[in-house]
Image (cartoon, rainbow, N blue to C red):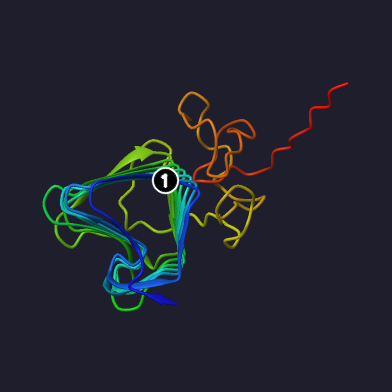
Amino acid sequence: MDRDLYVLVSGFLTSSRIQVKDNQAGFGAGLFLYYDSVAIIQESSIENNTADEAGGGILIYYNSVLTLTNSTVNSNSAPYVGGILNDASQVYLYNSTISGNTADEESAYAQVNTDAQGMFEHSTIVSNTAVITNTGLAIYSGTLTITNSIIANNGTNCDFPGGGVLVSGGYNLDDGTSCGLSGTGDLTYTDPLMQPIADNGGSTLTHAPSSESPVRDVIPMGICTAATDQRGFLRPFGTGCDIGSVEYGFSVYLPIILK
């Protein structure tokens, strides 16, 4: 393992198809956005990084902005927030996965301090573990808006220890009721029946729905605005789009033969 080797952003970064893996640092062991920075990351993996203090996968600090598209944050660890720590910043997650991250407190995502905001759309937040707090998403402050997304198997999926707010944009799934979902098409107390994280095509590891998953074909055509899933496969594959980052089914690409 490389120690104290990670991506530190102070300014602007745009990157596609990168893998930030097996690093260790005090804070933000995979990616650290520092003071008024902007990062746009696509089709990338932040995987198996370890922070000694906080933000095992990603730390976004003080008025920074992270946009994560078609990407996976998995198997990272820290005492505080194994996956993504949003400290007074903005996080946008599209067609992405947060999975298998571990911490003592807050496993998948935490949003802290004034002006912290988040927006998750068509994303999958599953199977993250916090040994002490048993919390997946901890919204201490600001607003987190979640749409067309799966939140499951994270112990207590959502907690609001500081008065933060979760707003449902509709068509989300919570396998309990801790997120307080009440939007159009939201499902609670529902097991998403997801497959283990694996190479299901595309550039990153993902969780595919099983054939009997209740996330399939739930989102009406007129409301599903994502043309593809995390792998780049077309949506919908059926009568409607699936909740989460991966559309059930497969795509077949035929070669073009010129004569």
Foreground of the two, 203 or 235: 203
Tally the numbered discs. Answer: 1
Residue 115 visible in image? yes
**Label 1 SS:** strand
Asked whether, in this view, residue 87 is left or right of residue 66, the answer is left
Residue 7 position (above or below residue 250): below
Can you name the residue that lies furthest to the top here? 259
Image-quadrant location for residue 20: bottom left
Horizontal and vertical percent position of residue 219: 50, 34
Residue at the (30%, 67%) spot, across then down: 81
Residue at the (57%, 61%) spot, across then down: 197
Residue 208 position (above or below residue 168): below
Horizontal and vertical percent position of residue 92: 33, 43
Horizontal and vertical percent position of residue 71: 47, 50
Residue 188 visible in image? no
Foreground of the two, 188 or 92: 92
Residue at the (51%, 57%) spot, across then down: 191
Can you name the residue that lies furthest to the left here? 114
Q: Which residue was labeled with disc 1?
A: 15
Residue 173 position (above or below residue 22): above
Task: Tell me if mark 1 has few (under 14), some (14-19) or many (20+) residues whose alpha carbon lies within 10 angstroms of its own.
Answer: few
Image-quadrant location for residue 120: top left
- Identify the image quadrant of the N terminus: bottom left
Mark 1 belongs to which amino acid?
Ser
Horizontal and vertical percent position of residue 118: 27, 46
- Identify the image quadrant of the C terminus: top right
